[in-house]
């Protein structure tokens, strides 16, 4: 039987463990201990991702990630009615501690009930937030599952990611020439001016229903009275349309050509690289059907939605694993206003329990 109090306590215990991206060792140790107590054999691959397995036939994967975004250290969980939030100085930690708490309570309650369930494999990645780094490094030779549910979406558990975009990151490192801004500015080449010209040639914001483009950071200069010699521009774009992807890559290439022609003495280095690829689930896929049936069995109607974000599911699909991303009762992810809805957290455990008993 699902223990609501234990579920809340587990979630609060997990969010109190600092695990900002790149600093997940304590969380890895905690999850290893908890999964081993549940009878799983837990291994870490070369990157430190956790793979927990058990005896049986082909297992079904339950997946989440260890890390949180910044500021995620020193989280103080506060129960406020039907919500759990932070004290406002940090994120709430629901992304992804809510997903991990759902997995742990599901496995614990089924074990206590001595109920039959299908074999399970738990895969928990490191450094998901900076761009699915752990999942890209995951040793898939250690993975037996061909189907998975990934608890890593905002909202209730019946909110399902229908499609997720391809994500391209870009970095431009610009070197001009420094000069005294008041005495000989004509002898300088402003890296910031070059960056500005480059940015104006690029699209911005939501381009269509499937595409967004953003310049995220601009850094440069050294002092107020010096023509800036260096500048750095970083950004991203996301799209579910491959034709749009090609067109935007061409837009970036043409913009770089234009500014290089305009500033021939400057050095402009560029790095444009994909971080993850798009996927779209098939509603007739056996994994999707299992998840829909489990939701309907507890009285929920699946809510398929497009997503502008990525998750480890993007990488799983590249490796032939049918992965469905479900909500984990978390809201306002990546902000100081983040909170988890307790009744929806319980509902997610009900769903996961029904799924594993199928």
Image (cartoon, rainbow, N blue to C red):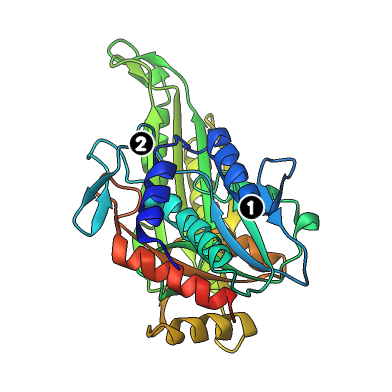
**Between disc 2 and disc 1, whose residue precedes?**
2
The furthest residue to the left: 81
Left or right, 2 with respect to 254, comes to left
Q: Residues within 10 Å of mark 1 (few under 14, many from 20)?
A: many
Left or right, 95 with respect to 247, comes to left
Q: Can you say whether 227 is above or below 11 in the image?
A: above
In the picture, the disc for residue 238 is none
Nearest the viewer among 14 and 302 is 14
Nearest the viewer among 295 and 232 is 295
Nearest the viewer among 149 and 348 is 348
Residue denoted by label 1: 135
**Quadrant of the snapshot with the N terminus:** bottom left
Question: At 42% from the left edge and 55% from the top edge, which residue is drawn?
Answer: 98
Check contact, mark 2 vs mark 1: CB within 8 A. no
Q: Position of residue 196 (x, y in %)?
A: 36, 40
Instruction: Name the element at disc 1.
Output: helix
Residue denoted by label 2: 71
Q: CA distance from mark 2 to mark 1?
A: 22 Å
Q: Position of residue 295 (x, y in %)?
A: 45, 81
Q: Position of residue 14 (x, y in %)?
A: 44, 44
């Amino acid at each position: 039987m699902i223990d609501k109090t234990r579920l809340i306590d587990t979630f609060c215990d997990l969010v109190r463990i600092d695990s900002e991206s790149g600093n997940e060792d304590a969380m890895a140790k905690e999850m290893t201990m908890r999964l081993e107590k549940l009878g799983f054999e837990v291994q870490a691959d070369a990157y430190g991702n956790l793979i927990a397995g058990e005896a049986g036939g082909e297992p079904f994967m339950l997946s989440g990630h260890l890390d949180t975004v910044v500021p995620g250290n020193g989280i103080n969980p506060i129960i406020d009615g039907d919500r759990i939030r932070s004290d406002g100085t940090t994120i709430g930690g629901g992304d992804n501690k809510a997903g991990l708490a759902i997995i742990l309570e599901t496995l614990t309650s089924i074990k206590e009930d001595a109920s039959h369930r299908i074999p399970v494999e738990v895969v928990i990645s490191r450094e998901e937030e900076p761009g699915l780094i752990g999942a890209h490094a995951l040793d898939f030779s250690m993975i037996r599952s061909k189907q998975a549910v990934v608890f890593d979406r905002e909202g209730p558990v019946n909110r399902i990611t229908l499609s997720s975009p391809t994500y391209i990151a870009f970095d431009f490192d610009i070197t001009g020439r420094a000069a005294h801004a008041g005495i000989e500015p004509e002898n300088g080449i402003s890296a910031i001016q070059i960056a500005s010209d480059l940015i104006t040639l690029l699209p911005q914001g939501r381009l269509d229903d499937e595409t967004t483009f953003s310049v995220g950071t601009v850094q440069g200069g050294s002092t107020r009275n010096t023509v800036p010699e260096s500048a750095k521009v970083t950004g991203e774009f996301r799209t579910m349309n491959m034709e749009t992807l090609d067109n935007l890559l061409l837009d970036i290439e043409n913009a770089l050509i234009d500014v290089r022609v305009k500033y021939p003495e400057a050095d402009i280095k560029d790095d444009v690289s994909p971080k993850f690829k798009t996927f779209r689930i098939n509603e007739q896929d056996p994994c999707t059907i299992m998840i829909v049936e489990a939701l309907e069995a507890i009285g929920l109607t699946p809510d398929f939605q497009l997503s502008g974000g990525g998750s480890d599911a993007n990488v799983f699909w590249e490796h032939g694993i049918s992965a469905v991303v479900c909500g984990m009762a978390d809201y306002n992810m990546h902000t100081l206003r983040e909170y988890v809805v307790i009744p929806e957290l319980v509902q997610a455990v009900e769903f996961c329990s029904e799924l594993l008993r199928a």
